[in-house]
Image (spheres, rainbow, N blue to C red):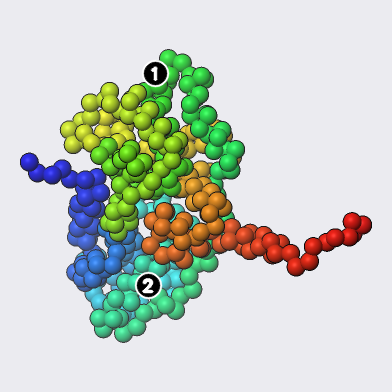
């Protein structure tokens, strides 16, 4: 019997198919770029880059008079070589608000614009490296200045309030709403407790299978970014929430074919989606905090608590699955500064023995 395809493997296959569909709309040399990027990027990153490049090529066709009569696939390397820095500055301006091919209005924040321009810079770097264009004009364009965001997370008292709120949410419901809440109560509590108690990413959470849980060692096997497998350990609260969910809810559900081993199921008896978890977290958190809380903010809540408890930035980076500890340092720089300030008072050179001073 063939081994069933894991959630992450299925996601990779779907992203690969989507990427191929994107590339059908783009010039042939773009395919060569993605082939070159494959060893160093994830399937999700490549799909995001393909979307960004499609936006760029559509912009060229619509805004450049010399290219209006060409199909996007026919835009040549000579056409790209003729572009000046001002063309990319116009593209930056365009990205603030534009209509998609299906008529939707799309907007981008500074972060979104910076990401798309970074993709273009990478694309032109590849073309320069292969000597397909003479220089990289994107390097001559100022990137949007992105302000450092403060870490948003729940305070310890808000964590307690949130978990209590999920447990007692049914008290304010009746009828059909109460019925659906009771069906999902233990699942929702298990998901939120897991996110708060381990710091796993929401994509890692929805990808979990029942067979990934090891209650003997209180660990879960997850697939990190880049495909690395890792065991993340959990404490008694997470253990109880998972066991309650399995015993009181999950084991009584017959999943649809192909979802038999999925840990967290939707109301349709399929593996729950990232979007569904995000909506669920938003629903509960909006009642206990004025902050905009997402599953990623629950991950930040865990990372902050772990760093404050241990002071070990390398441990935090390892547990959160950051490939580069500098990523962790960047996110928790303010907390590091707080610890440095506290350290200034930790060493006392002379005890003050004067009772009047």
Quarter of the C terminus within the rendering: bottom right
Residue 199, compared with residue 96, is above or below; it is above
| SS state under label 1 | helix
Q: Where's residue 172, x and y in %?
A: 52, 20
Tell me the residue at 83%/61% (across/down): 352
Image quarter of residue 50: bottom left
Q: What label does residue 121 carry, if any?
A: 2
Tell me the residue at 74%/64% (across/down): 348
Residue 282, compared with residue 96, is above or below; it is above
Residue positioned most to the left: 1
Q: Circle 1 sits on which residue?
A: 179
Would residue 335 appear left or right of 93 to someone viewing this image? right
Q: Earlier in the sequence, mark 1 or mark 2?
A: 2
Q: What label does residue 233 carry, if any?
A: none
Question: For the image shown, how many numbered marks are present on the structure?
Answer: 2
Tell me the residue at 42%/77% (across/down): 139
Give the class, few, some or many, for how many residues have Cα within 10 Å of label 1's Cα (few <14, many ≥20): few
Tell me the residue at 44%/69% (across/down): 90
User: How far is mark 1 from mark 2, CA to CA?
Assistant: 52 Å
Would residue 340 appear left or right of 179 to someone viewing this image? right
Residue 82, compared with residue 318, is above or below; it is below
Q: Where's residue 298, x and y in %?
A: 48, 44
Query: Viewer-proximal residue, 143 or 231?
Result: 231
């Amino acid at each position: 019997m063939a081994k069933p395809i894991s959630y992450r493997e299925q996601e990779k296959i779907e992203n690969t198919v989507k990427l191929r569909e994107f590339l059908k709309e783009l010039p042939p040399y773009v395919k060569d770029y993605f082939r070159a990027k494959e060893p160093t990027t994830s399937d999700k990153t490549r799909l995001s880059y393909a979307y960004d490049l499609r936006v760029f090529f559509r912009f060229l066709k619509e805004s450049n008079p010399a290219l209006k009569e060409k199909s996007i696939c026919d835009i040549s390397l000579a056409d790209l070589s003729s572009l000046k820095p001002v063309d990319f500055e116009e593209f930056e301006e365009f990205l603030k608000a534009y209509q998609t091919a299906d008529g939707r209005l799309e907007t981008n924040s500074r972060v979104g614009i910076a990401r798309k321009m970074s993709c273009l810079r990478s694309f032109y770097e590849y073309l320069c490296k292969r000597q397909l264009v003479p220089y990289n004009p994107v390097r001559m364009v100022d990137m949007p200045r992105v302000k450092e965001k403060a870490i948003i997370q729940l305070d310890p008292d808000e964590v307690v309030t949130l978990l209590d709120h999920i447990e007692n949410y049914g008290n304010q419901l009746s009828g059909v709403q109460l019925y659906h809440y009771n069906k999902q109560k233990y699942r929702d509590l298990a998901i939120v407790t897991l996110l708060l108690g381990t710091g796993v990413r929401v994509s890692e959470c929805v990808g979990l299978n029942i067979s990934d849980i090891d209650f003997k060692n209180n660990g879960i096997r997850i697939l990190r970014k880049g495909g690395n497998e890792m065991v993340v350990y959990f404490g008694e609260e997470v253990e109880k929430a998972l066991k309650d969910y399995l015993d009181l809810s999950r084991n009584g559900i017959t999943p649809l074919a192909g979802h038999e081993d999925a840990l967290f199921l939707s109301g349709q008896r399929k593996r729950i989606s990232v979007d569904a978890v995000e909506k669920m977290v938003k629903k509960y958190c909006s009642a206990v905090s004025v902050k905009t809380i997402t599953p990623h903010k629950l991950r930040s809540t865990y990372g902050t608590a772990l760093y404050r408890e241990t002071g070990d930035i390398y441990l935090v980076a390892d547990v959160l699955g950051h490939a580069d500890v500098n990523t962790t340092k960047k996110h928790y720089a303010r907390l590091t500064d707080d610890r440095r300030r506290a350290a200034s008072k930790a060493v006392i050179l002379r005890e003050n023995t004067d009772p009047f001073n």
